[in-house]
């Protein structure tokens, strides 16, 4: 049995800027738009994780598209975080329970 041919990975910067449709990064006059600092950090963390794990950007992009389709009215970067969580769980980097515990700790910690 032979493995199906794989497409070569797209360079990360080109892959990110090529996101289109609902998955396209929010821009205003060609510049990225972030409504809050955490959104820019979420973008940076996702890029760093994809690069550090040596993943093909399409793995993240597929999860982002699925997150947006599942909750089309959700704010864009909430879908981005959901896609990142799904990628990390699917790759066995972290469990869903560990994410839930970390979120619970954040919600109960003082500002």
Image (cartoon, rainbow, N blue to C red):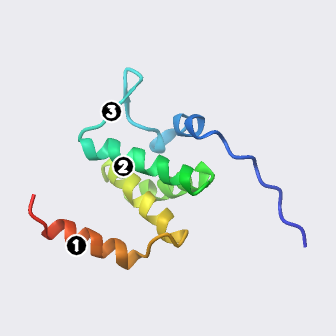
**Mark 2 closeness class: few <14, some 14–19, many ≥20 residues within 10 Å:** some
Name the quadrant containing residue 5: bottom right
Q: Position of residue 54 (x, y in %)?
A: 61, 54
Can you tell which mark lies on residue 33?
3
Residue 79 against residue 89 in the figure, above or below: above
Going from the N terminus, do you reach mark 1 or mark 2 first?
Answer: 2
78 relative to 12 in the view: left or right:
left
Residue 96 position by quadrant: bottom left
Q: Residue furthest left?
A: 110
- Residue that numbered label 2 is attached to: 42
Instruction: Give x and y (percent) for residue 86.
Output: 46, 65
CB under 8 Å between discs 2 and 3: no
Residue receiving disc 1: 104
Label 1: few (<14), some or many (≥20) within 10 Å?
few
Residue 10 visible somewhere in the drawing? yes
Which residue ends up furthest to the right in the rendered image?
A: 1
User: Is disc 3 placed on a helix, strand or loop?
Assistant: loop
Q: Earlier in the sequence, mark 2 or mark 3?
A: 3
Which residue lies at the image location 53% right of the left edge and 39% below the top edge? 16
**74 above or below 91?**
above
Measure the alpha-carbon separation of dots 3 and 1.
Answer: 28 Å
């Amino acid at each position: 049995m032979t493995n199906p041919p794989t497409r070569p990975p797209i360079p990360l910067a080109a892959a990110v800027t090529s996101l289109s449709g609902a998955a396209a990064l929010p821009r205003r006059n060609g510049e990225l738009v972030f409504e809050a600092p955490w959104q820019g950090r979420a973008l940076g963390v996702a890029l760093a994780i994809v690069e550090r794990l040596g993943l093909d950007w399409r793995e993240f992009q597929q999860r982002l598209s699925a997150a947006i389709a599942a909750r089309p009215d959700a704010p864009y970067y909430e879908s981005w975080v959901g896609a990142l969580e799904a990628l990390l769980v699917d790759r066995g980097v972290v469990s869903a329970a560990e994410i839930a515990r970390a979120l619970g700790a954040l919600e109960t910690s003082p500002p």
